[in-house]
Amino acid sequence: MKLLIREIIIVLLSLIVINESVKLSAVKNKYHKGVKAYTDERWTECIAQFEESISLYRVYRKRIINCRLKCNRNQYNSEIQNNIEDLKIYELLLKKTVCLKQCIGSVADTHLQEEFQDIIPIMSARKPFEYLHVCYFQMNALPKAASAAYTFHFGHPDDITMLNNVKYYSQQPEVDVNEIEDLLIENFMIYYKNGKDAYNKNDWEKTITNFEEAIKDYFSVENNCRAECELQPDQQISSEFFITIANNIASLLHCQQQCQDILKKFSYQSGIEFLTDVLDYLQISYYYTKDYEGAAEAVSTYMVMIPDAEDMIENKKFYSSFVDKEAFVNRSDIVYYFKRDTYEKMILNLFHKDSDEGSFKIKDEL
Ligand SMILES: *[C@@H]1O[C@H](CO)[C@@H](O)[C@H](O)[C@H]1NC(C)=O
C-alpha cells in the first residue's frame, strides 16, 4: 500500500512538470540550495536539492532540444520567388527564429534570460554528482555514493581524486561492483555492450537487434548534443556584419564536431569509427543468419566511409557470390551522416585556413 501511494505521488509530480514550463531559474535555485546544504553538512537536504536539480534539468534540456530539432526540421514556405542576393537565406533564418522563440517561450520560459544560463555548463559537466556522492556517503548510502562518484568520473576521466573515490567505494563490502553505473549513460552504449556480448556468444539475432538499435540511438544522442551547441554564449561580436556571422558559424560547427569527442568514452567509440565498427559486426551477423542482402548493405555502407578497407573489399567479393550487384546499396541515414561530417570538416578547414591568412579573426580556440 505504501508503495502504491508513493507511485501515485511520483505520477502526480511528473504530471505537474509535464504541463508546466520548466524554469531554468528553478534548476539554478535547486543547485545552489544543494551546494549550501552540502556546506552546512545537511546531508538529506543536499541529496533532495541536487536530485531535484538533476531531474528538472533533464526535463528542461529535453524540451529545449526538442524545440531546436523541430524548428530545424520544419519546412518553411518561402514568400520570395526569385533568388535575389541572400534574401532566401535571411528569410529562412528569420522564420526559424520565430519558430524557436515561440517554442522555447512555451516550454521553458527563463531560457532566454542570460542571468540563468550559467547553470547550463555546470549541469552538463555533471557537477551535482561531485557533491552528491559525499552526501550519499554521509547518509551511509554507499551503493548510491559509488554510482554518483562513477557518474562524475565518467564525465571527467582525468580527475584522479574522483577515480580514487570510485576505487574506495568499490572496495566496500556494501557495494556490488557490478551495480556501479553511470547514472547518465546513453542507451547506445548499453546496446553496443549487449551487442558485443551476444556476438561473443554467437547469438547472431541478438547481436543484430542490439547493434541496429545502437546505430539508431547513436544518431539520436549525437543530434541532441549537436542541438545543444546552438547555445553559444560569449561570442565575439565584430562591427563587421559577416565577420560576426562567420564567427558564430565556426563556433557552432566546432562545437557540433566536438560532440563526437564527448560521446567517445573509455571503451566506446563515436562518429565514423563507431559506425564502421558496428557495421563490421553487423555484416558478419547478417551473414550467419543467411541474410546476405543485409550483409551486402552493411559492407557497401562501410565502404562509403572507408573505401579502401582491404578486408571489406574481400568481403564484398565473397558476398558477390550470394547476391546480385544491386544488393550492395548504401544505408541512407549513414550516408547522410557521413556527408554532413565531411562537409563540416571541410568548412571548418576553410575557416582555419582563412583565419591563418589573417583575412578575418575567429575565436582563438578554433
Ligand atoms: C554506394 O556508395 C558508393 C561510394 O560512395 C558508390 O560508389 C555506390 O554507387 C553506392 N551504391 C549505390 C547502390 O548507390
Image (tube, helix red, strand yellow):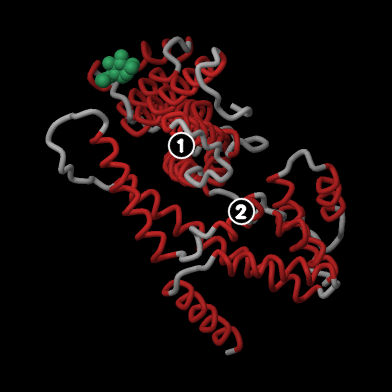
The disc placed on residue 184 is: 2
Q: Secondary structure at mark 2?
A: loop
Looking at the image, is 38 positioned above or below residue 276?
below
Total marks shown come to 2
Q: Which residue is mark 1?
A: 204
350 versus 156 height, above or below: above
Residue 202, position in %: x, y?
Answer: 52, 35
103 lies left or right of 36: left
Which of discs 2 and 1 lies nearer the camera? The answer is 2
Q: CA distance from mark 2 to mark 1?
A: 29 Å
Depth check, front residue: 251 or 195: 251
Residue 56, given in percent of the width and then of the height, sits at 56, 66
Q: Which mark is residue 310?
A: none
As shown in the figure, which amino acid type bears the numbered disc 2?
Leu
Q: Residue at x 57, y 15 (%)?
A: 356
Name the kind of residue labelled 1 in the image. Answer: Trp
* Residues at discs 2 and 1 in contact (Cβ within 8 Å): no
The quadrant holding residue 291 is top left
Q: Quadrant of ligand 1?
A: top left
How many residues crowd around disc 2 within 10 Å: few (fewer than 14), some, or many (20 or more)?
Answer: few
Q: Which mark is first along the chain, 1 or 2?
A: 2
Residue farthest bottom in this picture: 1
Residue nearer the viewer, 350 or 239: 239
For residue 307, above or below residue 125: above
For the point 47% across and 78% down, the residue is 16
